[in-house]
């Protein structure tokens, strides 16, 4: 575990694997930290250089006051990857992490050779929805939203398991300011036109039970990019890497092999 000072924020990050290995960068969802990817990491090929980080306001990264912009979130990871001398990575982003992936690809295509857009979209929700959510968090804390979030995140079957508590705890123990800040970043983002300009190998992943970014929304975004691929994971909600890690890892490995990244 390491910290990097971008000049605006201090990012907690971790690098696993050989320094000269093909690089895969993971960006997690709103309300989670880098542990989101723990279930799939043991299933990835040896020799990869795996970079994970906590976006601002999440995990062990610093939590600036105020509402955040998507531009700031993109710049944060851009500076981290420059610091780590990353070029031609595969960027795997889930939910807001997938929005960060799109923004980074448009801004710095030299950093990225391909991307995986999991349970995300060029535009998520409406400003009204996010305004209400931000107000609720600022008034009553993340706990006030937690049960509703769990319903959108996970299938009914998963919500009956003891593991649900792990993810609910991760959500509610996060910083209210960070959750609200990143919610504002999502609210202000519409990447339909920029994403449609992209030309790089892209895999889209959706979950049949996703209440946050339904499959049709994910497919609509992925279809903006010529030559992209789309896969639907059944019996999974917004976090298929948690509910169906074997299938998620298999899809990722197949994609990496297909572009010669392993």
Image (tube, rainbow, N blue to C red):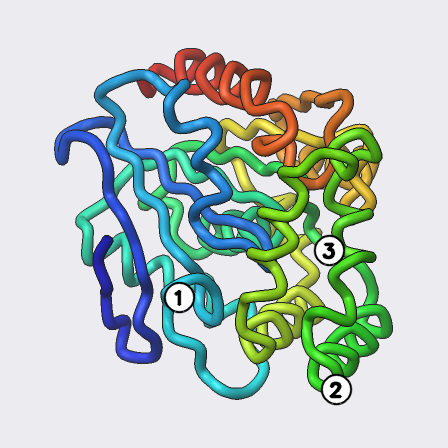
Q: Earlier in the sequence, mark 1 or mark 3?
A: 1
On screen, residue 150 versus residue 196, left or right, reads right
- Could one spot residue 220 in this view of the protein? no
- What is the CA distance from the residue labelled 1 to the residue labelled 2? 29 Å
Query: What residue did someone put label 2 on?
Result: 139
Dot 1 or dot 2: first in sequence order is: 1
Q: Residue at x 73, y 55 (%)?
A: 123
Which residue in the structure is indicated by mark 1?
75
Q: In the image, what residue occupies the spot 63% across and 22% down?
A: 229
Left or right, 8 with respect to 69, comes to: left
Q: 157 or 123: which is nearer to us? A: 157
Q: CA distance from mark 1 to mark 3?
A: 19 Å
Q: Which mark is residue 44?
A: none
How many numbered badges does the structure rendering display?
3
Contact? badges 1 and 2 (CB < 8 Å): no
Is residue 164 shown left or right of residue 78? right
Q: Which residue appears at 37% of the width and 67% of the height?
A: 61
Please say whether residue 21 is visible from this viewpoint.
yes
Q: Residue at x 66, y 74 (%)?
A: 184
Q: Position of residue 58 (x, y in %)?
A: 48, 65
**Dot 2 surroundings within 10 Å: few (below 14), some, or many (20 or more)?**
few
Residue 24: percent from left, percent from top? 35, 34
Q: Residue 12: x, y in percent?
A: 31, 61
Look at the numbered disc 3 and give the secondary structure of its residue. loop
Question: For mark 3, what is the residue?
Answer: 123
Secondary structure of the residue carrying numbered label 1: helix
């Amino acid at each position: 575990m390491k910290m990097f000072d971008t000049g605006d924020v201090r990012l907690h990050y971790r690098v696993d694997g050989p320094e000269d290995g093909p690089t895969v960068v993971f960006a997690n969802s709103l309300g989670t930290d880098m542990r989101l990817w723990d279930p799939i990491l043991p299933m990835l090929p040896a020799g990869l250089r795996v970079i994970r980080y906590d976006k601002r306001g999440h995990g062990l990264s610093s939590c600036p006051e105020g509402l955040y912009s998507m531009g700031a979130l993109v710049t944060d990871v851009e500076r981290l990857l420059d610091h780590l001398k990353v070029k031609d990575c595969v960027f795997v982003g889930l939910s807001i992490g997938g929005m960060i992936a799109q923004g980074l690809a448009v801004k710095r295509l030299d950093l990225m050779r391909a991307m995986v857009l999991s349970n995300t979209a060029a535009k998520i929700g409406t400003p009204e929805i996010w305004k209400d959510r931000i107000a609720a968090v600022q008034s009553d804390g993340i706990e006030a939203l937690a049960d509703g979030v769990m319903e959108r995140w996970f299938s009914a079957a998963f919500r009956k398991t003891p593991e649900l508590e792990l993810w609910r705890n991760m959500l509610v123990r996060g910083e209210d300011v960070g959750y609200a800040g990143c919610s504002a970043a999502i609210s202000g983002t519409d990447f339909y036109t920029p994403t449609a300009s992209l030309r790089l190998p892209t895999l889209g992943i959706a979950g049949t039970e996703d209440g946050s970014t339904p499959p049709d929304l994910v497919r609509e975004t992925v279809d903006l990019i010529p030559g992209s691929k789309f896969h639907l994971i059944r019996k999974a909600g917004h976090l298929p890497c948690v509910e169906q890690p074997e299938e998620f890892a298999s899809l990722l490995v197949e994609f990496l092999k297909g572009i010669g990244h392993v």
